[in-house]
Image (spheres, rainbow, N blue to C red):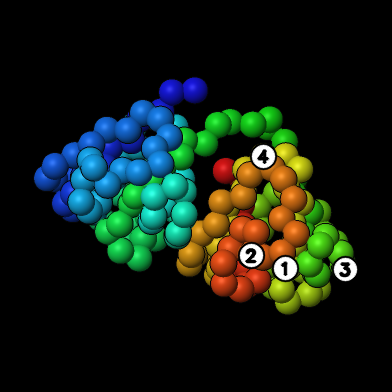
């Protein structure tokens, strides 16, 4: 799959720019700040720090200033082009660490975890199919966390701070 994303140093697609066509572990040599983005092809995960670390942002479309992609600042230091998976997406969420406690399976987006689950926090996941984006707040707001297929036995496997998840959706 080929992708194309253009990073601009200034708002409204102005200033120095850099076009990325594939994953990059360190973008710092191409631009010093990123205030707007235009995704030409593909779906991208942007990271605040090099080597796919730090806050994550899911991008597709155009963003004339960084707050539009829910950015907290104008830093983008690495990016990953997501690859399409099967049309099926499936995830299991668990009440406790190590894939234990109450379990709930999802194949569709979840706009509000509090409304869909009988327990408050999610402590582990098993992503069976597809890629998912998790958000700290309901209605797909707040910090974002990208999960690929695999087991996430504790929240520190995917998110450094807490087990709070407000919503999630398929990419």
In the image, farthest residue toward the top: 1
Near mark 3 (Cα within 10 A), the count class, few <14, some 14-19 or many ≥20, is few
- The Cα atoms of the two marked residues, 3 and 4, are separated by 23 Å
- The Cα atoms of the two marked residues, 4 and 2, are separated by 21 Å
Task: State whether residue 93 appears in this view.
Answer: yes
Q: At numbered mark 3, what does the secondary structure look like: helix, strand or loop?
A: strand
Does label 2 or label 1 sit earlier along the sequence? 1
Residue 79 in the figure: left or right of residue 20: right
Does label 1 or label 3 sit earlier along the sequence? 3
- The Cα atoms of the two marked residues, 2 and 1, are separated by 12 Å
In the image, farthest residue toward the left: 15
Mark 3, residue position: 101
Q: At numbered mark 1, what does the secondary structure look like: helix, strand or loop?
A: loop
Q: Closer to us: mark 2 or mark 1?
A: 2
Mark 4, residue position: 130
Mark 2, residue position: 156
Mark 1, residue position: 122
Q: Answer above or below: position of 149 versus 138.
A: above
The quadrant in which the C terminus is found is: top right
Residue in front for this viewpoint, 25 or 106: 25
Near mark 2 (Cα within 10 A), the count class, few <14, some 14-19 or many ≥20, is few
């Amino acid at each position: 799959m080929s992708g194309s994303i253009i990073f601009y140093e200034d708002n409204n697609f102005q200033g120095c720019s850099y076009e990325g066509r594939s994953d990059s572990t360190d973008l710092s040599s191409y631009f010093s700040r990123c205030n707007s983005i235009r995704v030409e092809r593909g779906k991208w995960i942007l990271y605040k720090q090099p080597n796919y670390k730090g806050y994550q942002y899911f991008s597709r479309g155009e963003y004339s200033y960084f707050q539009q992609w829910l950015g907290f600042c104008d830093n983008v230091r690495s990016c990953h082009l997501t690859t399409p998976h099967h049309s099926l997406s499936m995830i299991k969420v668990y009440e406790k660490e190590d894939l234990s406690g109450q379990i709930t399976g999802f194949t569709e987006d979840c706009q509000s975890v509090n409304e869909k689950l009988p327990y408050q926090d999610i402590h582990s996941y098993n992503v069976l199919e597809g890629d998912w984006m998790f958000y700290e707040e309901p209605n797909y707001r707040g910090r974002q966390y990208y999960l690929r297929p695999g087991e996430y036995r504790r929240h520190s496997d995917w998110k450094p701070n807490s087990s709070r998840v407000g919503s999630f959706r398929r990419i």
